[in-house]
Image (tube, coloured by chain):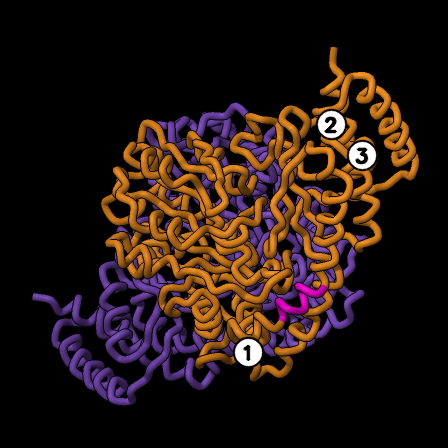
Chain colours: A orange, B purple
């Protein structure tokens, strides 16, 4: 089969009639599925049931001499600080353990910079004329929404196979109003790209005009391989420190996609000075996050090795789901030359770059046929994909059979959107 | 025995020598006790152990068709919204359930007003020249610290037996820069005062020059009687609405002193418009708070009636502790006329107003003898008690025997501080 672009108008119109009929038939099936978000499936959640049994007797709630049921220990239960330290390869004193949401911690880190500045005596960002922010794109919509809410001017940075375009980044950070950057260095959301060592080194070492430049380093998928064994990843705190920028970076992680999305634990890792600053400011708003849940997680997940054993079980559940999506794309879309996608080996998404100008229409057609995808454009700052091309597929929630039907709808919708575009007057 | 103020200098010097000797003897006992915060004791925490058993099977995590382990439901699990609605006497749709900290929600409500304003199109407070805030004092130091952190000018309002001095409040709110007020209407922290119906009505009905006036209504102790049966309390949302100010108030509650201080659930209650505004803004920073813990609480605590039965057990544990403190004051201090205190029937504190100019010295003497109290002054805005008089005693944490020793230290320290002052050259 040859690519649509090589078909003549007559062939395209005939194909369009056929695909339109396929689409109407699929619509009549009455699917009702939402795969807009990277939600784990029920099978994955059930893996963690034994965690709810680790705290039984009253004495179980004592840890390092602390009654975790009571007030105190703002930075988190020591056992859980040690756990995250092992996971990320840092020291426990560099770990602040939060509640169930790393997003909340990210919001707070930026919020404090905005209201109080990045450290004692530093200028609050709300007093800056303009704050610019580097956003590798496509990226995570919730990151972009935080930036947008603080009135930042977001600058999209093209993603390459080894991470963001570093030539461009190094040029832009010469502007002192460029105050920071979002990064998901391992299995980026949505592309599943792993930043190369060279890219990470350049990010850690680059000289920024803003001395209070803030690197927001989201390790959301740092142990989330599904198609390959665990891949070690660079430890960004010590890298930044080695290049003379110890206070540049906050790294974030959570168990949202290890235990429970709605009831896990989160952390940030940072330098000692950043820890002192954030603890002082966070201490105004909270006495401590939920230490019972922190201890429960520390006792169950234990260390990186134990987590990796659990993640191997997640991988078994996820592999057929990702295969289902990739097989459908390979079989239905690849021969037509109307989209490109990477084959991720970790993370939570398949990122499809459709023929420019067809993503929103594909999304709309899917929606009309009962399949809700992440809204086209959402993976770009301000929800505006300049090429109207990127669509994020989140295969993790539904069972494989349902995902197969979903992919029929997706592929047919994409074909129809492209055919509509190619046959426009 | 007559009051110290009626003793002559010779008598005072003799007494001082005696009390100084008592103090030195107490110091040699080597006490090491911190009762600075309103922490429940271990016995209270043990009451709640069965709550950790309500979620066993995978199916237990389904509630109103929602898998509480997964993402979603920003405003909280419906079951837990219903629980808090019953507790506070409002509708479930007026309840937003948060994480383990109502302080965090308070910080967020004020933080959003500061950054984004109190509603669509309202002016962010950070753009106001000056924001003034009414602080009934003595009050809760963590409330004041939030106000201070947002750069507010705090105005202390004297507390009377039926709540804050409303004549003064009504006068001050004619100033448009007065943007809000802290209130703990039932068993105020630290005095244990219950605002009268008339006071509450005046707060709900008063005309404020600031149309975006924010009433921060902390129901921290709304079911926390220890010496009397449950006392019904006014429902502030409908009262404000009845007087034409539906968006004036956010009410806060938590289970920090019902289940676990470090791992309970919190909520705010507000109007529909406030709910829409806050949900939109909180949705930027978090997908949802911990819904497993919300459901666990809803299943265990059920409704106000079930909570009251639990609080009766708390009361049995707390009664002898408060009696210990009040008896010691009555026996050792009352005859000397060197301090006043109310006898609370609920809440978490005994608030002692020492002879002016002696609170800080009393605190220091206690500290030196191994007893850490809430720092003198902490109950006033900026930590500055204009009379240097108020000390907050938190009797809930230690066992009664330890509390008895602590009160020996407190009473002796107070006497010594007063005698030092009265015998100054």
**Can marks 3 and 2 be said to lie on one chain?**
yes
User: Secondary structure beneath disc 3?
Assistant: helix
The quadrant where residue B295 appears: bottom right
Magenta stretch, overall SS: helix
Q: Which residue is mark 2?
A: A4
Q: Position of residue B89 (x, y in %)?
A: 70, 49
Residue extent of the magenta highlight: A310-316
**Mark 2 residue crowding within 10 angstroms, few (<14) / some (14–19) / many (20+):** some
In the picture, the quarter occupied by the C terminus of chain B is bottom left
User: Secondary structure beneath disc 1?
Assistant: helix
Disc 3: host chain: A
- In depth, the one of A421 and A150 nearer the eye is A421
Q: Nearer the viewer, mark 1 or mark 3?
A: 3
**Residue ranking furthest to the top:** A425
Tell me the residue at 72%/54% (across/down): A323
Q: What is the CA distance from the residue labelled 1 to the residue labelled 3?
A: 54 Å
**Can marks 1 and 3 be said to lie on one chain?**
yes
Q: Which residue is mark 1?
A: A61
Q: Is residue B254 above or below residue A131?
A: below
């Amino acid at each position: 089969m040859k690519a649509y672009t090589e078909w003549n108008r007559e062939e395209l119109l005939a194909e369009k009639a056929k695909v339109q009929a396929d689409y109407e038939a699929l619509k009549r099936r009455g699917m009702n599925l939402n795969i807009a978000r990277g939600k784990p499936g029920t099978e994955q959640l059930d893996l963690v049931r034994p965690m709810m049994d680790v705290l039984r007797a009253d004495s179980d709630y004592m840890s390092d001499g602390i009654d975790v049921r009571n007030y105190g220990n703002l930075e988190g239960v020591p056992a859980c600080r040690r756990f995250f330290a092992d996971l990320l390869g840092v020291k426990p004193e560099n770990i602040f353990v939060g509640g169930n949401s790393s997003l909340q911690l990210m919001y707070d880190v930026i919020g404090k910079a905005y209201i109080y500045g990045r450290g004692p005596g530093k200028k609050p960002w709300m007093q800056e004329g303009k704050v610019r922010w580097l956003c590798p794109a496509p990226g995570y919509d919730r990151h972009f929404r935080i930036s947008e809410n603080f009135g930042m001017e977001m600058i999209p940075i093209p993603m390459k196979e080894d991470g963001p375009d570093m030539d461009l980044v190094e040029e832009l950070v010469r502007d002192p109003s460029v105050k920071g950057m979002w990064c998901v260095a391992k299995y980026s959301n949505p592309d599943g790209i792993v930043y190369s060592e060279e890219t990470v080194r350049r990010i850690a070492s680059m000289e920024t005009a803003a001395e209070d430049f803030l690197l927001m380093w989201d390790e959301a998928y740092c142990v989330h391989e599904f198609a390959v064994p665990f891949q070690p990843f660079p430890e960004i705190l010590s890298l930044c420190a080695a290049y003379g920028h110890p206070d540049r970076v906050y790294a974030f992680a959570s168990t949202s996609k290890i235990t429970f999305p709605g009831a896990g634990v989160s952390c940030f890792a940072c330098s000692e000075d950043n820890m002192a600053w954030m603890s002082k400011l966070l201490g105004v708003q909270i006495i401590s996050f939920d230490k019972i849940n922190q201890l429960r997680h520390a006792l169950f997940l234990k260390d990186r090795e134990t987590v990796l054993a659990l993640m191997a079980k997640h991988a078994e559940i996820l592999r057929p789901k990702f295969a289902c999506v990739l097989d459908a794309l390979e079989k239905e879309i690849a021969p037509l030359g109307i989209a490109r996608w990477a084959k991720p080996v970790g993370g939570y998404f398949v990122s499809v770059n459709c023929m420019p100008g067809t993503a929103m229409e594909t999304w709309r057609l899917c929606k009309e046929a009962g399949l809700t995808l992440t809204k086209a454009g959402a993976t770009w700052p301000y929800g505006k994909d300049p090429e109207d091309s990127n669509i994020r597929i989140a295969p993790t929630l539904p069972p494989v059979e349902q995902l197969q039907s979903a992919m029929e709808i997706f592929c047919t919708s994409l074909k129809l959107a492209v055919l509509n575009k190619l046959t426009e007057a």
